[in-house]
């Protein structure tokens, strides 16, 4: 079975993290997110994957060149201009001559793909869309079903008055090549607003399958952080790399945690980190490789990517630090704030209320205090 993973979006909502890495290459517990997606596909017997890229495509190439044995055949296809979700798959239609799967590259899920495929075949569908329920359907595309499982309509971002179901498109599809044949070539075209509604209009068999599984799109800072918390809290299967220093505290090779440091799991630390005496790390927290948490600093419920350094009395709470962020003394970061790569924050700054700071910025001492 072949699968296409869509990884070409610019990930605007996750800026500034996506200024330097495409969303599917952002680490999730110290592994590029796309690795979690590939592991899920492999568990369900998918052995050939086409990555449809467009935004910063070289980052995928560089990464996969370094991996010897992925256990599946991988091809990267980069588009010159964004073709949209369906246009991107149409772009590789010549490689898809049998039933195939399509995945949004920003979804963390354990949907049972084998059952989805069984359902697709049993119904004789031309397209089957995995569905998931959400608490607030108004910011998604709703997919109400008829009694036999056929899709009744596609309703984009409805008002609460028009909400007739909590089932939304989970960004996971099974398609027959005949469905793709209906899509226009070489233009920006979407599944959600283009191909699927067109198929409904033509009376073609489009089915929905409520998956009832864990499902989260990592498209915003809140959700990117929640994905970390959910993995650390064991809500979805994950094999933690490194050794377990104490229950639910995993550390990579070369990491040194001073016996005088206070670490409360679930916490993952990458390789070669240093946590000094009197530093406090409270889970769910993920530290990348080469992070330094100095004496008196505190990290809680946060995500720090590789190479972050906190000086004494710095506090990072429920926030995300990109790669190589340096935080001065008595800096307080809180409320899902997001700091881009290579940021240097001088002492005595307060970065709160979901502030986002772009990469390579230097903030002098006592500059931001609201
Ligand atoms: P936002 O800009 O924050 O909305 O994120 P996004 O650019 O990732 O868009 P969205 O979340 O709607 O995309 C869903 C999935 O489709 C993601 O995995 C994207 O990488 C992918 N995607 C979106 N547009 C394109 C495109 O034009 N080409 C390709 N190849 N992939 C796309």
Image (cartoon, helix red, strand yellow):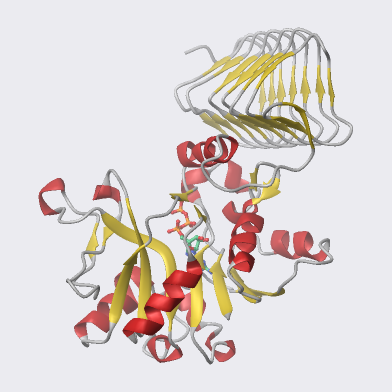
Picture mark count: 0
In terms of depth relative to the viewer, which is nearer, 228 or 342? 228
Q: Is residue 243 left or right of residue 207?
A: right
Q: Position of residue 107 (x, y in %)?
A: 50, 55
Decide if residue 126 is in sight here: yes
Determine whether, in the image, residue 179 is placed left or right of residue 220. left
Task: Give the residue furthest to the right.
Answer: 254
Can residue 54 be seen at all in this image of the molecule? no
Residue 138, given in percent of the width and then of the height, sits at 24, 49
Instruction: Please state the horizontal and vertical placement of residue 195, each as a whole percent of the image.
Output: 33, 79
Q: Of 332 and 151, which appears nearest the observer?
A: 151
Residue at 38% of width from left, 76% of height from top? 119
156 vs 147: above or below: above
Q: Residue at x 36, y 75 (%)?
A: 128
The N terminus lies in quadrant: bottom right
107 or 359: nearer the viewer: 107
* Left or right placement of residue 17 versus residue 178 in this view: right
**Image quarter of residue 291:** top right
Query: Residue at 48% across / 49% down in the picture?
Result: 12
As drawn, 45 above or below 99? above
């Amino acid at each position: 079975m072949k699968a296409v993973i869509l990884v070409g979006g610019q990930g605007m909502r996750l800026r500034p993290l996506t200024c330097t890495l495409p969303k599917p290459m952002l680490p999730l517990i110290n592994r590029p997110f796309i690795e979690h997606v590939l592991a899920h596909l492999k568990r369900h017997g998918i052995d050939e994957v086409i990555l449809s890229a467009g935004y910063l495509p070289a980052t995928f190439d560089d990464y996969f060149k370094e991996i010897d044995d992925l256990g599946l055949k991988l091809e990267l296809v980069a588009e010159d201009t964004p073709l949209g979700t369906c246009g991107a798959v149409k772009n590789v239609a010549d490689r898809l001559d049998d039933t195939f799967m399509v995945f949004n590259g920003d979804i963390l899920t354990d949907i049972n793909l084998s059952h989805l495929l069984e359902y697709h075949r049993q119904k004789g569908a031309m397209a089957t869309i995995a569905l998931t329920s959400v608490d607030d359907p108004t910011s998604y595309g709703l997919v109400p079903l008829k009694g036999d499982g056929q899709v009744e309509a596609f309703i984009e971002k409805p008002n609460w008055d028009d909400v007739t179901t909590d089932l939304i498109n989970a960004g996971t599809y099974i398609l027959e090549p005949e469905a793709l044949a209906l899509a226009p070539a070489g233009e920006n075209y979407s599944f959600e607003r283009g191909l699927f509604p067109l198929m409904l209009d033509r009376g073609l068999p489009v089915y929905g399958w409520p998956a009832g599984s864990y499902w989260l799109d990592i498209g915003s800072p809140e959700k990117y952080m929640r994905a970390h918390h959910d993995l650390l809290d064991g809500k979805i299967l994950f094999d933690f790399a490194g050794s377990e220093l104490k229950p639910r505290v995993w550390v990579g090779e070369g990491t040194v945690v001073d016996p005088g440091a206070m670490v409360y799991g679930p916490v993952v630390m990458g390789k070669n980190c240093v946590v000094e005496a009197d530093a406090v790390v409270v889970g769910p927290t993920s530290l990348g490789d080469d992070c330094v948490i100095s004496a008196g600093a505190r990290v809680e419920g946060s995500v720090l990517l590789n190479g972050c350094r906190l000086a004494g009395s710095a506090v990072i709470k429920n926030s995300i630090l990109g790669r190589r962020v340096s935080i001065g003394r008595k800096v307080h970061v809180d409320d899902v704030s997001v700091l881009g790569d290579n940021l240097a924050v001088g002492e005595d700054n307060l970065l709160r209320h979901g502030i986002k700071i772009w990469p390579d910025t230097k903030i002098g001492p006592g500059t931001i205090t609201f």
